[in-house]
Image (cartoon, rainbow, N blue to C red):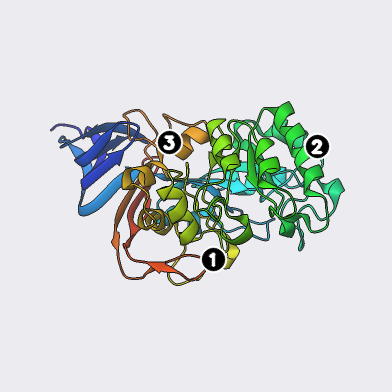
Amino acid sequence: MTAPLFDFIIHASRVFCADSNFNGPGSVAVRDGRIAALGPDIDGPAHRTLRFDDGLLLPGLVDLHAHPARGGSKYGVDPDQHFLPDGVTTVLSQGDAGADAWPAYRDATIGGSTTRVRLAINLSRPGESMPGGCFEQLEWADVDACLRAIADGGDSIWGIAVNVSEIACVRTDPREVMQRAMQVRDESRKPLLYGIHVPRGWSLDEQMRLLKAGDVMTYCFRGGEHSIVGEDGHVHPAVRDARERGVLFDVGHGMGSFSFAVAEAAIADGFPPDTISTDKYARHIGLVPPHTLPRTMAKLRAAGMCERDVLRAATSRPAQVLGMAGEIGTLRPGACADIAVLVPDDSTPLVDVEGNSRPGGGWRAALVVRAGRLVGGS
C-alpha cells in the first residue's frame, strides 16, 4: 500500500497567489506544515482531500494594522479568537505594547498565540495601557527605553508605532513626539507605522516630508480634515511625492478611518493603497455584520480597486512589508502552509464609517490553515 504523499490537498474553483502568478482553478497540497505543491490539478495519495466548488483559495491573510493582545492593551483582542477564524494568519499590532509591557506582550501574545503576531512597538513607554492618550505625557515618548526593547525583540518587533493624532497626543506637541520617533527609526533602522495629526494644526506637506522609504502611513482613506484627497478631487501632491520616495500607504479601517468617498476618489486618481488592514480592536467585537479583513477587502473592491490588487494587498504585499516574503503571503512550494479559503457572503451591505453603503458583496472564511494545521472557518 502506498504511503500518503501529502497530509491534505485542497481543491478550489479559484486559487490566487500573486507571488506565484497563479490565478485560476487549482489545488494546493500540504505536507509537514509547508506548501508541498501548487498546480491546476494536484493528485496523489493524501490523508485528507477537501474541495471548495465556490471557494477562493489564498495564502493566509496578513493584517498589517490591528490590535492583537492578550492583556495589557485597552484596545487588544485575542488574535486566535478574533483574527484567525476570519482567515488572518499573520497580524501586526499597532502599538498595543510599549517598552514597559514588551516582555509580557512577547510571552502572552506573540509566544502564546497560534496566529503569527508581530509588533510595531509603541514609542510611548506605557503603550495603550493608559485610559487617555498614549502621548499625553511627553516623557512617555522614551527614546532610550524604546531602543532597548527593539534590541531585545529582534524580528518580533517590526517597527515603531507613532500615532500623533489629537486623541493620542492630547496637548503634547506632535512635532516633538515625531522627532523622537524619527530618532528611534534612524538608530534602530526599523520603519514607522504613522498616524497623521490633523492637517489644520500641522500641514500635510510638513508631515509627509518626515517619512522615509519603508515607513507606512496608515488611515490613508480617512475622511474629513484628514483626507489625502483635495477639494479638486485629486490626491494631495505631498502624498504622491511621499509614495514616489517609497513611503507606503495602508488602509487602517477602524471605527473612524475609512470613507468610501475618499477611497473612490483616490483609487480613481490612480492611488490605491499598498496594504489593506482592519485596525480591528475591542469596540468591534460583537458588531453585526462582523468587522473582518475579508469584508474590508470587499469594501476596497467596491470602491473601484482591481480585485487582483485587493488580494495582493492582503497577502503578498504586506508579507513584503513585514520582510517575510517567501515565507508568508505565498503558496509557493516550501513556504509556510498558511492558507485561507474565502467564499461569497452577500448577506449584508458594505458600509463605511460614515454610514455610506455600496453594493458588491463580501467574503467570509470557509477554511483556515495555519502552519499546516486546520484551525478555523465555517
Residue type highlighted by circle 2: Val
- Mark 1 / mark 3, whichever is N-terminal: 1
Instruction: State the mark number for residue 143.
Output: 2
Residue type highlighted by circle 3: Ile
What is the spatial separation of the Cα atoms under label 2 and label 3, in whole angstroms?
31 Å
Q: Is disc 1 in contact with disc 3, using a CB cutoff of under 8 Å? A: no
**Residue 81's x, y, as percent?**
49, 59
111 relative to 26 in the view: left or right: right
Residue type highlighted by circle 1: His
**Residue 226's x, y, as percent?**
62, 55
Which residue is more in the foreground, 355 or 255?
Answer: 355
Say which residue label 3 marks: 328
Instruction: State the mark number for residue 284.
Output: 1
Q: Between tags 1 and 3, which lies in front? A: 1
Identify the secondary structure beneath mark 1: helix
What is the spatial separation of the Cα atoms under label 1 and label 3, in whole angstroms?
26 Å
125 relative to 311 in the view: left or right: right
- Mark 2 / mark 3, whichever is N-terminal: 2
**Residue 235's x, y, as percent?**
52, 47
